[in-house]
Amino acid sequence: MQKNYKKSFLLEQNLIHLFKEKKSELFGNCHPKVALSRQQAFDDFQAKGLPTTKEESWKNTNLSKQYEDIFQLDNPLTELDKSAGEIFQCDIHGFDTDVISMLNGWYYSPEGKQLQILENGIVVGSILEAQKAYPEYFDSYFDEIAKGRNHGLTAVNKALFRDGIFIYVPDGVEVEKSIQLINIVNRDEKMMINSRNLIILGKNSKLSFLHCDDSVNHNPGFINTLTEIYIGENACLDLYKLQNINNETALLNNTFIKQELNSRSKVNVISLNGGIIRNELNVEFSGEGADADLNGIYLMDHEQHIDNQVFVNHAVPNCNSSELFKGVLDDSASGVFNGYIYVARDAQNTNAFQRNNNILMKSTAKIDTQPFLEIYADDVKCSHGATVGQLDEEALFYMMQRGISRQDAYLLLMYAFTAEVTGKISIEALQSNIEDMIKKRLRGELAICEKCVLHCGHPDIPLEFEIDMSKV
Amino acid sequence: MLLNIKNLHVSINGKEILKGFNLGVNKGEVHAIMGPNGTGKSTLAAAITGREGYEITKGEIIYKGKDIRDMAPDERANEGIFLSFQYPVEIPGVSMTNFMRTALNAQREYQKLPPIPAGEFLKKMEEKKQLVEIHAKLTNRSVNEGFSGGEKKKNEIFQMAMIEPQLAILDETDSGLDIDALKVVAKGVNALRSSENGFVVITHYQRLLDYIVPDFVHVMYDGRIVKSGGKGLALELEEKGYDWIKKEFEI
């Protein structure tokens, strides 16, 4: 259906033009399923257009500024400057990761290897290379979860993505080192980047994956990422998303997870900074006994906007899901939390919990929080709760009466508020690093890092409450 | 004189609660303030500690020779004023240990001292925990979170022991305590009594004063002190109740 009545945005016109112009390039050397998905998504995009505030799930997230901006949409892979290798250096004390990188929307390997086989047959690399080398995985998994689930921007991504990462963990393999994706935009032009990732966890496998989105400068940008993750039987995924992008950048992060029998997922979405961030997290249980633990923290100020859309589909019986999203909004920042839980007719013995807590530091900050439960089974335990409040004045006075300054008391309370979520991070070194970043963010000292989001090797100025003596 | 309150008038939302309150506390003294409910006892504690919303319309609070009316609550605390809260506040996510360390270091910074070394801090914690008989595990938990009424009150005294204030105000510390907890709290307070500090013990009942023996007892009614005496006055009140006071001073 062509929406002729709708005004066409500049970005819309430019994207359509790009698709037509670059068609041969986009479709060249392409897995048939990828080609099909591109064409279908493009048709879908032409019908739907870019999502606007007239659509229910977008009513509080307005990208019209981006839609009328001129972005460089096609970013040819250029000769990387010599410092590129340094950009991706990242060392978290006590936390050793295998780093993979995306630079300006392209998979970047300092050794020039677009696809690598690590020990135990783990495959890591560019999705473009992977579709050639492992067509069978694309036959089985590509677009299987995300198919047909489009709004205008997912359609854009599917039609126009240039690159992305691919990870395959074979059956029975537990990946020892966490894999860390650092996604960096470093260009002088305004860019829109569409990248698409595919992650496959075989039966009885285990992966911890860290997805970092960073800016290295203050140029406006538009990042549109789509990730499909397939978690096989009895497999286990730890997924961390760390978002620290500049105030001029819009980030759309769309994640589709499908969980088989007895699989487990644990997701932590930490949004520290960004102009507009929208995280869409879709989890579907397709096997019984599966468990999803979905958590998020967002710390927004100035004119920033955060939107977390979480959809959990209890399609089968005997699964558990739990959601805990907490946020602090200061100044004129605004936020959205939409938690949608669907329990299918036969999905008996479902446990689904959801909680969203917010602190508004000023009366000008806003949050729109909305649970949506659709339940067709009768033997179900579901709960949801949302709170919006200010910092506890009683607690502030109590702390000040013990000699703690108002400012430190504020920090301590906000930090404590987020600790419930960070406490769930199972990798200790990562947990303390993220906690440090949150402290810095709350003190207004978290810069958009020149290197990477995890502040390589810069020792922090100790905070008075930094050391938890109970751990000494 | 450690604390000298002169003709203090305090209003909340325009309603006058303290109406010409006078009190002088010297170092080494324990003053008990008694009186029926709603006579302004807790307002007095709030005014001394600088709580927001309590407007001083007349009079002054002189502490260690300085008028403290314009000092922020944290500054007054760092000057040595401590309040044992009637209703201690739960602070989820902030461990007792971190809270105490932050408080002690704030005080030390105020005194231009370096932060307390970890070893010294832990030793002090252990020592003071034993004083008020609180379980080791309690200090690993979040401040007051899930504490019983008795534990919360013991925790106030524990904090007082850690902070070592010069002026301690105990606001209804005995309320909600069973006799064993009461004895523990009193033991803690008595251990901290010295010739260098003063106490203001606000209580509704005489019971606490069996264990914390005051040097002076004052009876408050309608926003000011209407009667003062020695510890015998508390016993008299216990016997006769507050009605005779009310009758005598009813306007």
Image (spheres, helix red, strand yellow):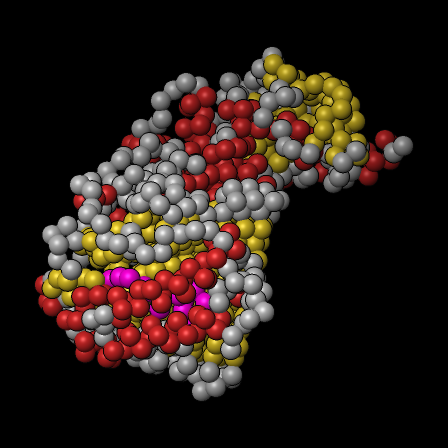
Instruction: Write the residue at 61% across / 44% down.
Output: A364
Near-viewer residue (B105 or A64): A64
- Which residue extends farthest right? B251
Res. A265 in view: no
- Which residue extends farthest left? A119
Instruction: Write the residue at 58% across / 15% down.
Output: B64
Position of residue A129 measured from the top left corner of the image (x, y, whole percent): 18, 66
The residue segment tinted magenta is: A150-165
Res. A185 in view: yes
Instruction: Write the residue at 11% across / 64% down.
Output: A117
Relative horizontal placement of residue B136, taking residue B239 as reference (left or right): left
Q: Quadrant of the C terminus of chain B?
A: top right
Position of residue B203 measured from the top left corner of the image (x, y, whole percent): 65, 36
Relative horizontal placement of residue A414, taking residue B85 as reference (left or right): left
Instruction: Write the residue at 62% across / 39% down.
Output: B172
Residue A386 is drawn in which quadrant? bottom right
Is A156 colored magenta in this rendering? yes
Is B221 colored magenta in this rendering? no
Relative horizontal placement of residue B58, taking residue B163 as reference (left or right): right
Near-viewer residue (B228 or B102): B102
Position of residue B22 measured from the top left corner of the image (x, y, whole percent): 73, 21
Residue A279 is drawn in which quadrant? bottom left
Residue A227 is drawn in which quadrant? bottom left
